[in-house]
Structure formats: structure tokens, C-alpha cells
Image (tube, rainbow, N blue to C red):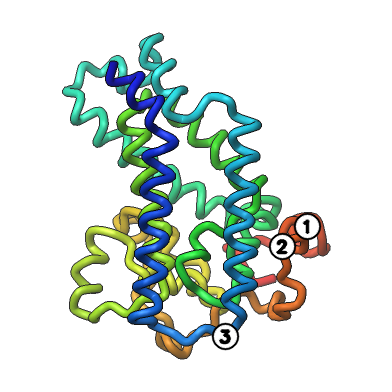
């Protein structure tokens, strides 16, 4: 019954949390912004919200079974490491959530390191401003590849349906939060960034400066960057002085929805951004 409830409720739970947190973050950004916006918020919101809508429809069409549904199938067939480890349920859920989060960190670094994947991921980095809608600005093909990776980890690790649901709710929530254009007290940020990726921590990752751009890959848990040497504490120019985006894409007139969808297929330069800027 719990599994059926999880599967039936999963889309509504995810959408409910997503819409609720998006509204909260939008109000928070209005009340206490960290930086003034440089580009049209209306155009950017249209582009970013349109991308998440296209992503959602495309994934539902291409993947009739969700990650939670896959987890239930895997569990029913006793596949995966966790389903054969004999651990308490709460521990398998916790390990599954942490394992998926570490996968997102590795995947994010990979999408910066491999030229063909960077072509997809740079859509996310072409945003000239940094606010909560930047957290949903991803190309549909990147979302497709992300789903394949996630399903593979669910199968191999044996993540429970509850673990998948908790992870996806947390990932959606923290992506909206850590892309927020919100002002947090420095003392609060210092404490929070040991528990969760904060906006000040992740904003560094969206810097036009290549060394900063190739740091802080975590989305939810902040530990991976510190443990694996990709952590950058603050941008050199400060949060109000730093430039957001990519050096080669600075014309707002070219950052339309159709252009963003075509971006992975245009241009000749495929150099790896982990090693050097384009």
C-alpha cells in the first residue's frame, strides 16, 4: 500500500513542493534581493519556465515509468546493493538519498569536463542573471541524460521508492533555493553551507571567471566540493561585483527560447571548460 501510495502521489508531491517553493523564493527575492538584475526578468522567466515545461513534458513522454516506479520494480525483483544488504529501511533510504546526491555532483562535474556534454549544460550558464528560475534552466537533452543516469543508479544501488521521492523533492527544492537572488546574513550563510548548498556558495559557480565557474558543483549537500577539492569560498569580485554567465554569450537578444534550444548544436568550439575557457 505504501508503494502504491508513493507511486500515485509522487507527481503531485513533487509539483506541490516545486510550485510552493518557487513562489516563496520569488517573494523572498523581491523582499531581500542580493544583487540588482541586469537583464529583463520577464524574458528570462519566460525562457526558464518554458524550458522546465518542455523538459517535464518530454521526460513524461520518453519515460513512461518514473524513477520512483523504477525503484519499486527493482525492489520487487530484489535487485541492487541496498535491496540485498539487510539494512534497516531508514538506513537504506538515507544511503539512497546520499548516493543519488553524490551522483548529481559527479554528473555536474562531468557535464563541465566532457565537451559534448558541456554543449548541453552551457544553456544553464548562459543566464545573465542569477535567480531562482536559473535553477530550472536546463536543456531537454541534458534532462534526458540525467534521467538515464539516475535510473541506472537506482537499479545498481537499489534505491527505495521513498528514497527516490525524498531525493527528488530535496533536489528540486534546493535547486530553487541555492539559485535564489536572496540576501542572507554572512553568519547564517557560514553555518548553513556546512549543511546545504547556499545561494552565496552556488552563485560562485555561475561566475564568468573560469576558475570560479569550475567550482562548487554540489546542488544539495555541500560536502562533496570540500572533500574532492572543488570548493571555492567566495568570488574574487564579491557577490555584488561578480559577473554572471559566460564570456562568449553576452547578447540578451540572442538568448531567446528557440536559440537556447538550438545552442548545443551551434558553434565549433568544443574545448573542455574544466581545463580552459572557451
Nearest to the observer: residue 15 or residue 141: 15
Tell me how far mark 3 sits from mark 2, CA to CA: 18 Å
Residue 24, quarter of picture: bottom left
Instruction: Identify residue for label 2.
Output: 257
Q: Quadrant of residue 163?
A: top left
Horizontally, residue 196 falls left or right of residue 114, namely: left
Where, quadrant-wise, is the C terminus in this rendering?
Answer: bottom right
Residue at figure coordinates x 39%, y 75% from the top left: 29
Residue at the spot 48% in from the left edge and 74% down from the top edge = 212
Above or below, 209 against 117 in this view is: below
The local secondary structure at tag 2 comes to helix
- The residue drawn where x is 38% and y is 81% is 33
Residue 203 in view? yes
**Closer to viewer: mark 1 or mark 2:** 2
- Residue 38: which numbered mark, if any? 3
Residue 11 location in percent, x, y? 44, 36
* As drawn, 144 above or below 160: below
Answer yes or no: is residue 218 visible.
Answer: no
Residue 170 located left or right of residue 242: left
- The image position of residue 146, as x and y in percent, is 55, 42
Residue 21: percent from left, percent from top: 36, 58
| Mark found first going from the N terminus, 1 or 3 | 3
Q: Which residue has dot 1 on it?
A: 262
Q: Secondary structure at mark 1?
A: helix
Residue 217, percent across and down? Answer: 44, 59
**Vertical position of residue 172 compared to residue 37: above or below:** above
Tell me the quadrant of the picture where the N terminus can be found: top left
Q: Circle 2: is it few (<14), some (14-19), or many (20+) Cα within 10 Å? A: some
Which is more toward the observer, 50 or 261? 50
Disc number lying in front (1 or 3): 3
Amino acid at each position: 500500500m505504501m508503494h502504491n501510495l508513493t507511486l500515485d502521489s509522487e507527481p503531485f508531491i513533487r509539483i506541490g513542493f516545486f510550485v510552493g517553493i518557487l513562489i516563496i523564493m520569488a517573494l523572498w527575492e523581491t523582499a531581500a534581493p542580493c544583487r540588482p538584475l541586469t537583464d529583463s526578468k520577464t524574458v528570462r522567466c519566460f525562457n526558464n519556465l518554458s524550458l522546465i515545461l518542455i523538459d517535464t513534458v518530454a521526460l513524461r513522454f520518453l519515460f513512461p515509468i518514473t524513477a520512483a516506479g523504477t525503484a519499486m520494480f527493482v525492489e520487487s525483483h530484489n535487485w541492487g546493493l541496498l535491496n540485498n544488504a539487510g539494512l534497516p529501511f531508514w538506513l537504506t533510504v538515507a544511503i539512497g538519498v546520499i548516493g543519488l546526491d553524490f551522483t548529481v555532483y559527479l554528473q555536474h562535474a562531468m557535464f563541465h569536463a566532457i565537451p559534448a556534454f558541456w554543449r548541453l549544460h552551457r544553456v544553464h550558464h548562459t543566464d545573465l542573471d542569477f535567480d531562482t528560475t536559473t535553477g530550472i534552466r536546463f536543456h531537454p537533452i541534458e534532462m534526458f541524460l540525467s534521467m538515464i543516469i539516475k535510473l541506472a543508479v537506482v537499479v545498481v544501488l537499489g534505491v527505495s521508492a521513498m528514497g527516490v521521492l525524498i531525493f527528488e523533492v530535496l533536489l528540486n527544492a534546493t535547486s530553487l533555493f541555492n539559485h535564489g537572488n536572496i540576501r542572507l546574513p554572512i553568519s547564517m550563510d557560514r553555518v548553513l553551507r556546512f549543511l546545504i548548498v547556499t545561494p552565496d556558495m552556488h552563485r560562485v559557480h555561475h561566475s564568468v571567471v573560469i576558475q570560479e565557474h569550475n567550482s562548487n558543483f554540489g546542488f544539495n549537500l555541500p560536502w562533496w566540493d570540500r572533500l574532492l577539492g572543488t570548493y571555492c569560498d567566495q568570488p574574487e569580485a564579491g557577490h555584488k561585483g561578480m559577473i554572471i554567465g559566460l564570456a562568449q554569450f553576452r547578447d540578451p537578444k540572442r538568448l531567446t527560447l528557440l536559440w537556447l534550444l538550438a545552442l548545443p548544436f551551434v558553434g565549433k568550439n568544443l574545448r573542455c571548460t574544466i581545463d580552459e575557457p572557451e
